[in-house]
Each structure stands twice: as C-alpha cells, then as structure tokens.
Image: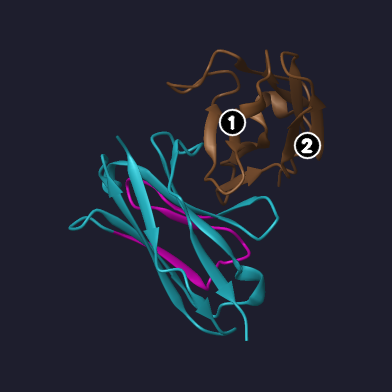
Amino acid sequence: SYVLTQPPSVSVAPGKTARITCGEDNIGSKSVHWYQQKPGQAPLMVIFDDADRPSGIPERFSGSNSGNTATLTISGVEVGDEADYYCQVWDSRDDHKWVFGGGTRLTVL
Amino acid sequence: EVQLVESGGDLVQPGGSLRLSCAASGITVNTNHMSWVRQAPGKGLEWVSIMYSEGTTYYADSVKGRFTISRHNSNNTVSLQMNSLRVEDTAVYYCARGVHPGYFHSWGQGTLVTVSS
C-alpha cells in the first residue's frame, strides 16, 4: 500500500512562499488531494486532483504532482495559513483504501 | 450549504460498543460517497470506512470485522457501529462526504470517542 511522506514541519515568513511536499514512489501517476486543519477545527480541502481548488479557496493555494513528489504551494503566506496540512491519495487497486500523509505543521514566523 | 453533524461520541470501556451518527443537510446521503475518518489525540488523519453512493462498503484493516457503516435514507443519516472497541480506537471521528470517491469534499466537526477503563 501507499506510504505518503511529508516533512513534519515547514516554517516561512509572512508574505513568502511555502512549499509542502508529499513523497511516494511514482506518486505522479495518482491524483493527490490536500487538506488544511487549523487547531481544534475539522479538515478543509484546499486542493483536489493535484492542482484544482474548491470554490472559496484563495488562488494563493496551488498544487503540482510529478514523478515521486507532489507539492502544495502557498504564495504570499498569511498568519491565518498557520495549520497542519495533509496530502491524501485513493488506492483503488484491490481493497479500496484512502491514505493520508503524516501531516506537515506550517508555522508562519 | 452542506452540513454534516456527528453525534454519539462517548467514554466506553475496552470491549464495549458505540454507535456514531452523522446527520446531513444540503445533500442526500444516498447520492454521495460517505466516509468516516478519525484522528487520535495529537496524531494525523486515518481513514476508517466508506459507503459508496451505490452501497458498496470498505473498511480500514484496523477496524475490519469490528465496525459497520450504514446509511438511513429516511432521515438522511450515516452511522458507524463500533464493536469490540480498543484503547487505540480513541479518536475524534469525522464524517466526510465526497462527490467523487477519491477525496473528501466536506467534513463535519467531529465527535470524540474515548476507550478507557
């Protein structure tokens, strides 16, 4: 089964660009989805199908996926973006599974 | 607006049972793919179970044979029957909905299940 590897933490100054990676062999062949979770809140989907944004998600959030790494990019980071971010894929090969990465804590310095 | 409201979380002893419910508004549960995802204290997200819109169900290996997902079209709810509960089942349980089966488009606020003696 898939094991999605994320860095435990990423730090960035306000206004700068944050990049959060999600690694797995040949992840570029899968669709990757990203969720934001602020403390005490439910997860919120911010990117689906590698690079699509749900309605209401700012354009500052973007995604890419190629080779062995998917990346969530947050441009012009704001203090309100401080949260945990999780990548996720759907393994539909045999017994269907939904796999999450371990999560990355984004700290805005 | 889609709303998912979970209920039923409680403190239960190991080996006990609990039934969680998810009340949906703004959608109908039998035309969506409805899931349960859990989060142990201080840990990451773990998918638990899904019922596809056509009725097929899947379970994580960690709960297979102990948990059962079901839906109730009459009151537009989804349930998770949890039996033989273990300490490691302690978590906030989220109800989540997907228009596409691959991801979770909307989430409820969660309900806390604590398994402890």
Give whichever of A82, B26 is nearer the camera.
Answer: A82
Q: Does the magenta portion include B69?
A: yes
Question: Over which residues does the magenta segment extend?
Answer: B48-71
Give whichever of B40, A49 is nearer the camera.
Answer: B40
Tell which chain the image draws in cyan: B
Say which element carries label 2.
Answer: loop
Total number of numbered labels? 2
Residue A15 higher or lower than B34, as above or below: above
Real-space Cα distance between discs 2 and 1?
Answer: 13 Å
Q: Is residue B93 left or right of residue A26?
A: left
Tell which chain the image draws in brown: A
Q: Residues within 10 Å of mark 2 (few under 14, many from 20)?
A: many
Residue A100 rendering spot, x and y as whole percentages? 65, 43
Residue A10 rendering spot, x and y as whole percentages? 80, 31
Q: Does the magenta portion include A62?
A: no
Q: Residue at x 51, y 59 (%)?
A: B93
Q: Quadrant of residue A103?
A: top right
Residue A6's disc is 2
Say which element carries label 1.
Answer: strand
Q: Is residue B30 left or right of residue A88?
A: left
The amino acid pointed to by label 1 is: His
Question: Which chain is home to disc 1?
Answer: A
Residue B109 higher or lower than A12, as above or below: below
The amino acid pointed to by label 2 is: Gln
Q: Residue at x 30, y 49 (%)?
A: B24
Q: Residue at x 73, y 18 (%)?
A: A14
Residue A33's disc is 1
First in sequence: mark 2 or mark 1? 2
